[in-house]
């Protein structure tokens, strides 16, 4: 049975049980970019909060009367090895988008889905949010270019770990939460999440100070902060700080409803690593010899060999560094 299509105006965005915190400036910046550009990509490392920021910015568009549609692409390559190109990925991408708009059922096959999708979006003040694009970024780029060309009033907001590299793309790099002191957004975020686990955290006079140092040690990464906060039902913030050197094993919430890649910090890193092609993995391993930062001339001097030709270093560096 087919869905009801896009006749009903409104927003179809995911709902979250926890409040959105610490990103007021970023929401404003993204909203301004969307007002001036038809394609905006939120870039950032895994766990930095791209999806939540995209949803919050999209909610603002919906409040201003736009129709908003959210398409989660994380499952498009479900069952395949992440990073392996599959001939049907492009078709599945179009099908997932059409299903999100209610044009077809997820299991329904149609040779004409892209045309129906364009017709549904044509002439509408609509925003399409494409989430988790990195695993099929080339297919997403092709799909996005077609939609923008054929539906002139459509705007698209994407989240990805690498850009689509389209001429019309406006990029916005999502930063971690700042963590300079006890009043910082990262500390506000951590304490709010910890308070949901154990309200008694407010009775600990050292919690805020320890939380500030913990947030700095975790680089203000929202996923890491959320995983740490989940441990406060058994550990004080000070005890968490003492154990943070074992963060890959400590920061876990197995058995929760979150995707597996978001249940542990190690899982997030493994997922990110699996998205890289072989030459990208080689480059990243060799960049690890630099203790803090590097310049391109140093990368070109140290990294190339028979496995990684010098001519490949610059293109890979421009994408990932």
Image (spheres, grey):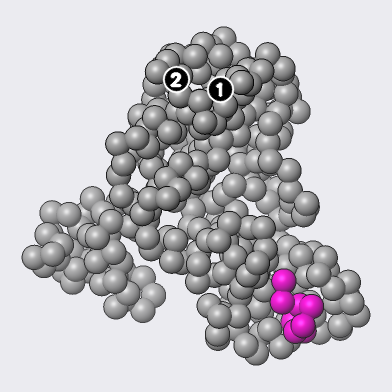
Q: Which of 221 and 226 is in front in this view?
A: 226
Q: Can residue 155 be seen in this view?
A: no
Q: How crowded is the residue under tag 2: few (<14 C-alpha within 10 Å), some, or many (20+)?
A: few
Dot 2 corresponds to which residue?
110
Q: Is residue 277 left or right of residue 156?
A: left
- Quadrant in the picture for residue 124: top right
Q: Which of 27 and 114 is in front in this view?
A: 114
Mark 2 lies on a secondary structure that is loop
Q: Does the magenta stretch include residue 190?
A: no
Report x, y in % for residue 220: 61, 66
Q: In this view, does 307 lie above or below 288?
A: above
Q: Can residue 305 be seen in this view?
A: yes
Q: How crowded is the residue under tag 1: few (<14 C-alpha within 10 Å), some, or many (20+)?
A: many
Report x, y in % for residue 32: 61, 33
- Quadrant in the picture for residue 273: bottom left
User: What span is in magenta?
Assistant: 229-237
The CA distance from mark 1 to mark 2 is: 8 Å
Mark 1 lies on a secondary structure that is loop
Dot 1 corresponds to which residue?
104
Q: Nearer the viewer, residue 212 or 230?
A: 230
**What's the residue at 32%, 74% (across, down)?**
288
Asked whether the beta carbons under mark 1 and mark 2 sit within 8 Å of each other, the answer is yes
Q: Is residue 150 above or below residue 286?
A: above
Magenta: main secondary structure: helix
Specify the quadrant that holds the C terminus: bottom left
Q: Is residue 272 left or right of residue 253?
A: left
- Mark 1 or mark 2: whose residue is earlier in sequence: 1
């Amino acid at each position: 049975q087919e869905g009801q299509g896009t006749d009903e105006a409104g927003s179809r965005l995911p709902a979250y049980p926890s409040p959105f915190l610490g990103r007021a400036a970023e929401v404003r910046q993204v909203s301004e970019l969307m007002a001036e550009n038809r394609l905006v990509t939120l870039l950032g490392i895994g766990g930095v909060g791209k999806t939540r920021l995209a949803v919050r910015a999209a909610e603002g568009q919906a409040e201003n009367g736009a129709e908003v549609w959210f398409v989660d692409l994380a499952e498009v390559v479900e069952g395949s090895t992440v990073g392996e190109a599959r001939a049907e990925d492009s078709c599945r991408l179009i099908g997932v988008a059409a299903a999100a708009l209610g044009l077809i059922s997820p299991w329904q096959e149609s040779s004409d889905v892209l045309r129906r999708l364009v017709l549904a979006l044509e002439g509408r003040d609509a925003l399409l949010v494409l989430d988790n694009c990195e695993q099929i970024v080339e297919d997403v780029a092709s799909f996005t270019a077609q939609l923008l060309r054929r539906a002139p009033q459509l705007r698209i907001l994407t989240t990805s770990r690498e850009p689509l590299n389209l001429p019309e793309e406006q990029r916005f790099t999502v930063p971690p939460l700042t963590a300079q002191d006890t009043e910082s957004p990262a500390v506000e975020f951590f304490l709010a999440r910890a308070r949901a686990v154990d309200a008694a955290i407010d009775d600990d006079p050292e919690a805020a100070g320890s939380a500030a140092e913990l947030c700095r040690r975790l680089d203000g990464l929202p996923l890491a902060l959320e995983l740490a906060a989940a441990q406060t039902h058994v550990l004080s913030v000070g005890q968490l700080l003492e154990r943070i050197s074992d963060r890959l094993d400590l920061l876990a919430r197995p058995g929760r409803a979150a995707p597996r890649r978001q249940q542990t910090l190690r899982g997030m890193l493994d997922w990110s690593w699996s998205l890289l092609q072989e030459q990208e993995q080689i480059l990243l391993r060799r960049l690890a010899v630099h203790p803090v930062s590097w310049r391109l001339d140093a990368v070109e001097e140290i990294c190339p060999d028979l496995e990684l030709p010098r001519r490949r270093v610059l293109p890979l560096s421009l994408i990932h560094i």
